[in-house]
């Protein structure tokens, strides 16, 4: 984890500083719970206090360099940065009346506090999330300052340093903008919910449940990885964290059964990355999507729209792991290698909190209230059996763990706010959108292609929340200008930003899986991208036909669309793996991929072509197989 995920590379403090950090994390969670239950503060106060907590704790927990990890003490420099972070976080609450009266006019002290906030956010992001997003934010700041010297259509009048600082920290358009606002309300509570779920042992239970559901099937461990990772995405906001936690369990099983090291790692990486696309949580990006899209779009609208694409994604991986297992003749796990089915089923009650949160969101309850009640239900449900009971100690530990998880999210969303602020202030979003349209000649498919490339590049090395903020701000406007519905456009860039985690050359999730499997990283990344082929196809389909997102469609038509899409994933998977009932010839593989694409695209003509291809390919498989058997 520490090698591939900056969020895991934290100090292990003890003594007075250890207690100070423990109490700070506990206070952070208590503050968030208090304001959620009794009413959040005004935007500037809620967000600045949230930011102050996060920054102060980050500089105590995360060293400037990884080599300092072995130290159980904090450097004097980091201690000073932590103290300055407290001052920055407290500045708004202590001076709110004066700041409001000034109406944007900064004093010398205001300027230096705002400048400090900007520098602290960039450094905290570098330490917790990594260099890519920090570099992107830095480039945007340079762009804001030196606008007149920029080439071509992206040039602008430029901002003075004072105006830039004022925008970044003394308005709700920069660091204290919408991304941090969502982090300080919805996201924190759901991270806390995930922390309580983990305390009940639900993470391990997902693995056991996946084993009894899929373990006995052909290539069982690979299917366990797919099923388990889909569930883990509910409680994990990180593709890399998902890979390392569930991969440590599934990858050795796949290798033992006979899968290649690279393929075993690729299955886990592709499935774990898909966990960020799986409702209801979607790596916490769904909460940001509600705020960014607006127009009356609810959280439930987004979760519902994302359901069918997510199912198709995991179905595609499941099919290809099954066909690969058949191709190389792998078995499933034996009964002795599986957990006791009766014991696992007796713990089925652990899934109640997840069901409850979905039902509450469906009922129209606010996201914050749904999260709070879900935490309460988790604590109550955990008390059913002694081995899952949380208790007072576990309750406090869950609060601390939840706050620790939220640190990197707070830093990433604050940093993403810098990018949003620059885009808003300079009009860069519209300029880039028009530039993409000009490059594509105003045609939809080329514009989608260039937007996909932009999203893949912008998403490399960024966590889920920041990833979505960047891609939705910079890439999504291009396709919205062509009349694509906002929800389709935002999900399009979200998908490609997320699968940057498994797209070479910067494929963090695949590299982490290779670290566990011992495989070659680039080969693992290539195999991951092949397994995740659905994620490269489906976004185009739901932009061209929003019925896949359950937008303006009927139940009958929706069932038909889903069935044809599943059939399409079946023969695309066969074409990519090169096996169905037997080994496929090159012509059959091409037929499978082309026919599958036609089936996924929900139009009458393409459905006819796709169904015909499916029947022909199935007949060829059966006929030649029988002919060989007879011979």
Image (spheres, rainbow, N blue to C red):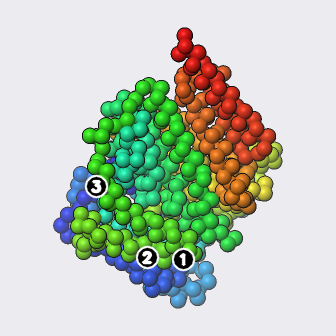
Q: Nearer the viewer, mark 2 or mark 3?
A: 3
In terms of secondary structure, where does tag 1 sit?
Answer: loop
- Closer to the camera: disc 1 or disc 3? 3
Query: How many residues crowd mark 2 within 10 Å: few (<14), some (14–19), many (20+)?
Result: some
Q: Residue furthest top?
A: 631
| Rendered image: mark on residue 365 | 1
**Label 1 with label 2: CB-CB less than 8 Å:** yes
Q: Count how many numbered circles sit on residues in the image.
A: 3
The numbered disc on residue 343 is 3
Residue with the mark numbered 2: 373
Residue 135 is at least partly visible in this image: no
In this view, the residue in front, 173 or 502, is: 502
Q: In whole angstroms, how far apart are the C-alphas of marks 2 and 3?
A: 28 Å
Query: What residue do we see at 55% from left, 28% from top?
Result: 580
**Residue 276, how many percent across, how many down?**
50, 54
Q: What x and y, as percent, mark residue 130?
A: 44, 52
Q: Position of residue 586 (x, y in %)?
A: 62, 21
Structural crowding at the residue carrying mark 3, measured as other residues with C-alpha within 10 Å and reported as few (<14), some (14–19) or many (≥20) = few
Q: Is residue 242 left or right of residue 19?
A: right
Callouts 1 and 3 close, C-beta under 8 Å: no
1 or 3: tag closer to the N-terminus: 3
| Viewer-proximal residue among 152 and 464 | 464
């Amino acid at each position: 984890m520490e090698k591939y995920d900056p969020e895991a590379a934290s100090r292990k403090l003890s003594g007075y500083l250890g207690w100070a950090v423990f109490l700070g994390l506990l206070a952070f969670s208590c503050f968030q719970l208090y304001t959620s239950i009794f009413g959040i503060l005004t935007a500037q106060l809620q967000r600045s206090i949230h930011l102050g907590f996060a920054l102060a704790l980050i500089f105590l927990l995360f060293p400037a360099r990884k080599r300092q990890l072995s130290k159980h003490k904090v450097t004097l420099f980091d201690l000073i940065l932590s103290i300055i972070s407290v001052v920055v976080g407290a500045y708004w609450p202590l001076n709110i009346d004066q700041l409001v009266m000034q109406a944007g006019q900064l004093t010398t002290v205001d300027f230096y506090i705002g400048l400090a906030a900007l520098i602290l956010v960039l450094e905290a992001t570098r330490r917790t999330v990594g260099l890519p997003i920090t570099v992107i934010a830095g480039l945007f700041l340079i762009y804001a300052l030196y606008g007149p010297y920029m080439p071509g259509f992206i040039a602008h009048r430029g901002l003075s340093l004072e105006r830039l600082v004022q925008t970044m920290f003394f308005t709700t358009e920069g660091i204290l903008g919408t991304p941090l606002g969502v982090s300080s309300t919805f996201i924190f509570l759901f991270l806390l919910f995930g922390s309580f779920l983990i305390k009940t042992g639900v993470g391990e239970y997902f693995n056991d449940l996946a084993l009894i559901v899929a373990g006995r099937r052909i290539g069982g461990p690979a299917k366990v990885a797919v099923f388990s990772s889909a569930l883990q995405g509910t409680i994990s906001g990180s593709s890399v964290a998902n890979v390392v936690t569930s991969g440590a369990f599934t990858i050795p099983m796949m290798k033992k059964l006979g899968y290649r090291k690279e393929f075993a790692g690729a299955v886990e990486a592709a499935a774990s990355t898909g966990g960020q696309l799986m409702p209801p949580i979607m790596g916490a990006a769904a909460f940001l999507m509600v705020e960014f899209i607006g127009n009356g779009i609810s959280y439930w609208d987004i979760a519902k729209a994302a359901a069918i694409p997510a199912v198709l994604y995991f179905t595609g991986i499941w099919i290809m792991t099954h066909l690969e297992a058949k191709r190389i003749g792998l078995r499933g796990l034996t009964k002795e290698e599986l957990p006791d089915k009766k014991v696992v089923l007796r713990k089925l009650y652990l899934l109640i909190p997840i069901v409850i949160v979905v039902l509450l969101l469906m009922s129209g309850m606010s996201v914050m209230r749904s999260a709070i009640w879900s935490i309460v239900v988790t604590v109550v449900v955990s008390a059913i059996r002694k081995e899952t009971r949380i208790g007072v100690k576990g309750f406090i530990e869950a609060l601390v763990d939840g706050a620790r998880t939220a640190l990197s999210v707070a830093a990433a969303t604050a940093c993403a706010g810098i990018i949003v602020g620059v885009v808003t202030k300079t009009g860069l979003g519209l300029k880039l959108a028009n530039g993409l349209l000009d490059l594509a000649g105003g045609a939809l498919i080329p514009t989608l292609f260039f937007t996909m490339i932009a999203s893949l590049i912008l998403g490399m090395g960024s966590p889920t929340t920041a990833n979505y903020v960047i891609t939705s701000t910079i890439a999504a406007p291009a396709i919205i200008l062509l009349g694509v519905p906002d929800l389709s456009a935002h999900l399009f860039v979200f998908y490609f930003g997320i699968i940057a985690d498994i797209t070479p050359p910067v494929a963090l999730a695949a590299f982490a899986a290779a670290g566990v499997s011992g495989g070659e990283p680039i080969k693992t990344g290539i195999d991951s991208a092949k397994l995740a082929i659905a994620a490269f196809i489906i976004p185009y389909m739901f932009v061209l036909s929003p019925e896949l997102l359950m937008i303006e469609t009927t139940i009958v038509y929706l069932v038909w669309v889903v069935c044809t899409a599943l059939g399409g994933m079946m023969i695309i998977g066969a074409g990519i793996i090169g096996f169905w009932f037997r080994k496929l010839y090159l012509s059959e593989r091409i037929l499978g991929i082309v026919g599958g694409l036609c089936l996924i695209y929900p139009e009458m003509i393409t459905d006819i072509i796709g169904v015909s291809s499916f029947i022909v390919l199935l007949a060829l498989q059966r006929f030649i197989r029988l002919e060989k058997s007879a011979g």
